[in-house]
Amino acid sequence: MESNLQPITPATPLAGYMGGKSRLAKIIIKRISSIEHTTYVEPFVGMGGIFLRRPFKAKVEVINDYSQDIHNLFRVVKHHLDALIETIDLIPNSRAEWQRQTRSNPSTLTDIQRAARFLYLQRLSFGGKVTSRSFGVAVSSRSKAFVDERVLELVRMLHKRLRRVVIEALPFEDCLRRYDRVQTLFYLDPPYYGHEHDYGPIFSREDFARLAAILADIKGRFILSINDCEPIRELFAGFEIEPVETVYTAAGYVNPRKPAKELLVSN
């Protein structure tokens, strides 16, 4: 049977994001490529660590995140490329500017200013943290730069990649129900169990049970990646569970930079 997936040049996420799947990307993308689908949906897209690294695309693609900063950034990159590049090109790479941006209220900014602010904070904050950020400067190696030609090129590449992508900002349950079809594949990367508030008040401990109940009733296929712990194994016991190993590189997780166990859950 001819595949509905079409080859495409992978893109690189614009910045780090807590819980990003860079070290598991090859395994997850291989699983995605093995499942026939015409519609691909990510209800928790984050900075697009899996979505952008795939070397193929589906006929219909949907990225969703309930974070207004995430949604706004992707939307601005897609529709206001030149204005965003002009804005970020003027922001200095300094601790004082980082502190000023941290203190600013994103709800008072224009969409373009808000997108530039979020990108700036994510690129310069330690470990891609969204909450409790700290200025990420490495004293023993070259410091991360916010504005250089590489950053501007990444923004241009993302703009091109998003050309035919639907961008949503729905609660995960609304996203699942709206796009659930027999030919749909969902890839889900919710917050880790025990770290639900690392992204702000958008996901709770109780949401894991709601998520499991919805996934048990969908028509399409899904792959979910999550940290390996007994409560998660119990909640998703009715599905296929595959243990995998990765490495956490950010503080706040157990034994950073040492092997850690995660699960790939699927139907």
Image (cartoon, rainbow, N blue to C red):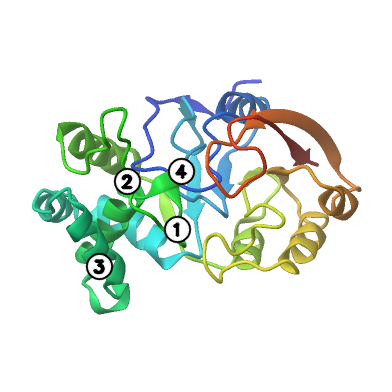
Mark 3, secondary structure of its residue: helix
Q: Distance between the residues labelled 4 and 2?
A: 14 Å
* Front of the two marks 3 and 2: 2
The disc labelled 1 sits on which kind of residue?
Answer: Val
* Circle on res. 111: 3
Q: Are marks 1 and 2 in contact (CB under 8 Å)?
A: no
Residue identified by numbered label 2? 123
Q: How far apart are marks 3 and 1 (CA)?
A: 18 Å
- Residue sitting at x 37%, y 45%: 164
**Above or below, comparing residue 225 to residue 101 in the picture:** above
| Residue 208 shows in the view | yes
Q: How far apart are marks 4 and 1 (CA)?
A: 15 Å
**Above or below, comparing residue 61 to residue 37 in the picture:** below
* Circle on res. 130: 1
The disc labelled 3 sits on which kind of residue?
Answer: Asp
Front-most of residues 56 and 197 = 197
